Each structure stands twice: as structure tokens, then as C-alpha cells.
Image (spheres, helix red, strand yellow):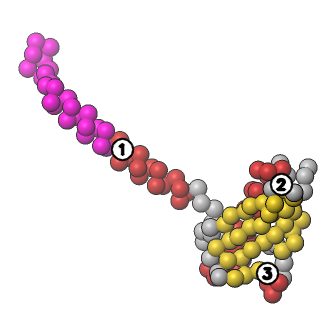
Amino acid sequence: MNEKGTYPVTGSEFRMGRAALAGVLGAALLVSACGTSSSDRVLFDGKSFRAKAKAVDKRNAPADFTVVVNGVSASLDGAREAGRYEGTKFCIDSFGSSKIIWKVGPETEPQNLRIADDKLTFAGTCQRP
């Protein structure tokens, strides 16, 4: 104990404390990073679907797009809504509008949907504001 009534910390104890603190903070960051990805997921019919929207021909017809939704066998209704969501997101991001004219979309009769290899494919055109 020194004259201030505290115990002096040696260099090795200080480094060990910093290493432990860095380990705890790193673990907390890792756990929090894992939690954000699952909490950011949007569920449809209680399930998560991988879906991707992309332009058919960026140069000649940038407003025409397709959406492919994987895992349609988990829930047709959920896959349809996931496709609607991705299409809407694509049009808002690309053109600033959520208006879409669907060629094959969420309102298409089930027998007319494009389903192959457990994937649902929609096609639509974004409408500019």
C-alpha cells in the first residue's frame, strides 16, 4: 500500500487487465453483431426468406426487374409477400416510388406462378413518380 492508501499496479498487471477488458468487449461486440442480423430480418408468414430483386436490363429497360424468392415450399403465402417486399424495396431504392406493374406478382393466381427448384420468380416494372 502506498501513502495514498491504494495498491500500486505493476506493468504486467495493467497489461493483463487491458487484455481481459479487450476480450470482454470483443465478445460483447461479437454477440451484439450476431443479434442484429437476425433481428433485422423481416419474417413473412412467420418464416425468413432469401429474396433478391434485380434489373432485367439496366441499360435498355432499367425499370423492368425480377425477384427470386428461395424456399417457397416453406410457405407460398410467405414467399409471395417476401417477393412483394423485395420488389417494392427495389423500386423505392432505384426510382423513388413503390408503384409496380406486376407481370407475374403477388396477386397472380397460384397456377400461373413461376415456381421451379423451390424458387418463386416474379417479374414487374417500376413506375416512376
Amino acid at circle 1: Gly
Residue, x 21% and y 31% (percent of image)?
15
Which quadrant would residue 60 be assigned to in this image? bottom right
Q: In screen coordinates, is 60 left or right of 116?
A: right
Label 1, label 3: how many angstroms apart (C-alpha)? 47 Å
Q: Are marks 1 and 3 in contact (CB under 8 Å)?
A: no
Label 3, label 2: how many angstroms apart (C-alpha)? 27 Å
Amino acid at circle 2: Arg
**Residue 13 appears in view:** yes
Say the numbered circle drawn on residue 113.
Answer: 3
Magenta span of residues:
1-24
Say the numbered circle drawn on residue 26.
Answer: 1
Amino acid at circle 3: Leu
Q: Is residue 51 above or below residue 109?
A: above
Say the numbered circle drawn on residue 117.
Answer: none
Residue 12 part of the magenta-drawn span: yes
Q: In screen coordinates, is 63 left or right of 40?
A: right
